Amino acid sequence: MATLGDATGVLNDLIEINNDRVAGFEKAIADIQDENIDLKQLFQGYAEQSRKNGLELAAIVGSADDIETGNSVSGTLHRAWIDIKSLFGGSDRASILSEAERGEDAIKEAYEDALASNDLPASAIEVVRSQAQGIFAAHDEIKALRDIAKA
């Protein structure tokens, strides 16, 4: 059976990618123009979801010395790519949603990997599974909105 010590790395990876998600949505919110104002509210809700996820995961990790508070290198690079795209006209609704869906693909994969690993103790599995359901629903909503915007 996995112990909390075994799970710290997996949980910190999830905290990190939730931090990336917050930063990514905050960047998108700052760049969204008035014609896509509805996306601001949606993205604010998802940023708040990841803040809550991070706090729940940090509570499981417990020791402040072991909690990841930063962002991943890939998340930082993704936000830099969003910055570059916005300079070259990638600010239409379909582009915004395509970039958001790419970010959602990454966090969805991280949760799938965490749940598939044998590193989570029983005390963490239910929290991660519950968070994953919210992440998967957000991914599906953004993907559906992207498909509508591309049509």
Image (cartoon, helix red, strand yellow):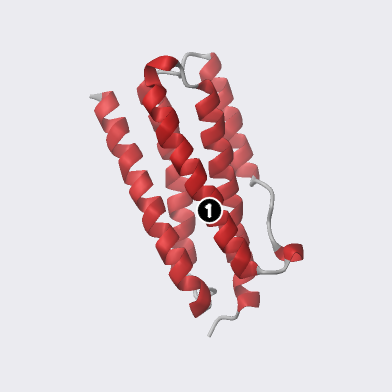
User: Where residue 99 sits: x, y (%)?
Assistant: 45, 32
Q: Which residue is drawn at 59% across and 38% down?
A: 23
In this rendering, position of residue 92 left or right of residue 31: left
User: Where residue 28 sits: x, y (%)?
Assistant: 51, 28
Q: Which residue is drawn at 44% across and 59% down?
A: 131
User: Where residue 46 sits: x, y (%)?
Assistant: 45, 42
Residue 75 vertical placement versus 126 (above, below) = above
Which residue is denoted by mark 1 in the rendering? 52
Q: In which quarter of the image is residue 95?
A: top left
- Name the amino acid type tagged 1: Lys
Residue 149 vertical placement versus 23 (above, below) = above
In this rendering, position of residue 86 left or right of residue 149: right
Considering every residue shown, the one lying at the far left of the view is 151
Front residue of 99/26: it is 26
Judged from the image, the secondary structure of the residue bearing numbered disc 1 is helix
Considering every residue shown, the one lying at the far bottom of the view is 1
Q: Which residue is drawn at 51% across and 14% down?
A: 88
Q: Which residue is drawn at 42% across and 46% down?
A: 105
User: Where residue 5 sits: x, y (%)?
Assistant: 65, 76
Position of the C terminus, as image quadrant, is: top left
